[in-house]
Every structure is written in C-alpha cells, then in structure tokens.
Amino acid sequence: MIQKLFSYLIPIKIFKKKSARSKIIEVTWANGELVLDSENTNYSYGSLQRILRYGLRNIGYNAVLKMDHVLLLGVAGGSVIKTLVDEVKYKGKITGVEIDSEMIQIANEYFNLNQIKQLDIIIDDAFEFVLKTKEKYDLIIIDIFEDIHMPNFLFEKFFSERVCSLLKDQGFVLFNTMILDEAHNIRNRKYISEINPKLFTSKMLPRIEVHNELIIIEKVA
C-alpha cells in the first residue's frame, strides 16, 4: 500500500471525525502502522501500545497466559487487546468496556476488533460497569482518557477499592495515567497511599513515553 510506504516519511491521515465523547478522532498511517489519535494524544497503537505492552511485560507474559479473564476499562482502538492476543498469545476471555460507541465502530472498521472471537465489547460507562459487575477478574486494565484529561472518579478511593475488590487472588490492576504537572504527581502518590498494603502490593512505573506513569497493583493471595 502506497500510503503505508509513504508513512515512513510523513504521517498520512486517512480518517477524521468529531466524536461527542472524544472530540476529534483521527486514524493515521505512521511509520508503517495505523494509529488512532485524539486531537492532542495517542489513543491506540503507536506510543500507547508500547506503554501498555511495557506494563504487561512487567507483570509477566507467562503470568498473563495463565489468566482466565481480563477486563479492559477504556477500549478505544483496542491496541492492548491486540498485544494480548497477537503477542502474548492470550487465549482467555477479554471483556472491553467503552463508553463511546463511535470509537468501537472505528476500531472495528480500521483495526478489525470485531474479528477477535474471545472479546466481548460492552458499551457502558466504566464507573457504572464496575459497580454492576458480579464477575471476578485476573487482570483489570484501566486506560481511560478524554483527550489528555482523565476523569476524576478514576482516582477516588471508592472507585479504586471497588476495582480492587473485583480481583481474584494474585490478580493485577494495570492503570495507565498521564503526568503533565506536579498536581498529577501528587494525585498519583495519594492514589498509591490509599491502597491497603495488607491486601495488595503496589508500585509505580514512572515516565514511560515521557508523560505516562503506570500503576500496578497485585492482590496478595
């Protein structure tokens, strides 16, 4: 494909749309691969895929392979799903929760997300879903952004405790956050300080791809 070849020289935008939830959504050929971006940041593939891949490697691909059920809060184009299926060779169930139905349409059309048979997509608000679900999960990936902004509820103690309560023994939370100023650093440190050390271990992987920080929580058996 000519566009793919030329994208090694210069990014080539092939789709742009205004979304009620995510403002501007763009699909671009960049360095030979399709990426999904908002107006100011990468949403899927590209740098975001590298960030979450790093988190999964920190947990351990072998550990992930033994898991039965992964929950993803915030699907966008589904790059971490592709990492799980294509690179980790994960065979278990994946539930993806995405509030923006337009985003899923784009993910299906450009990134073939609907061809992944073990994937169940639910259009819902992540906060509401976490309150309602009766399932327990081996891995919960939180990757929720509205452009460069993260909803405040993600960092509230009530939400973090509810997410952690959904983990199976030795289950993990992989939380992708963005650090743009000192207030965000303080926010993340507060979040970590509120995790119960008797039930969970937690750590931060700072400054991945400049502005991202991963928080990893493991439930102690």
Image (tube, helix red, strand yellow):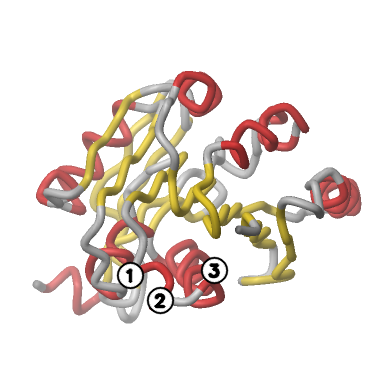
Identify the secondary structure beneath mark 1. helix
**Number of other residues with Cα within 10 Å of mark 1, as a class: few under 14, some 14 to 19, many 20 or more:** some
User: In the rendered structure, which amino acid carries the disc numbered 2?
Assistant: Tyr
Identify the secondary structure beneath mark 2. helix
Check disc 1 and report the residue beneath it. Answer: 65
Q: Residue at x 39, y 78 (%)?
A: 62
Nearer to us in this view, 203 or 43: 203
User: Which tag is nearer the camera, tag 2 or tag 3?
Assistant: 2
User: Which tag is nearer the camera, tag 1 or tag 3?
Assistant: 1
Q: Position of residue 211 (x, y in %)?
A: 69, 62
- 3D distance between C-alphas at marks 2 and 3: 10 Å
Where, quadrant-wise, is the C terminus in this rendering? bottom right
Q: Is residue 139 left or right of residue 17?
A: right
**Number of other residues with Cα within 10 Å of mark 3, as a class: few under 14, some 14 to 19, many 20 or more:** many
Check disc 2 and report the residue beneath it. Answer: 61
Check disc 3 and report the residue beneath it. Answer: 55
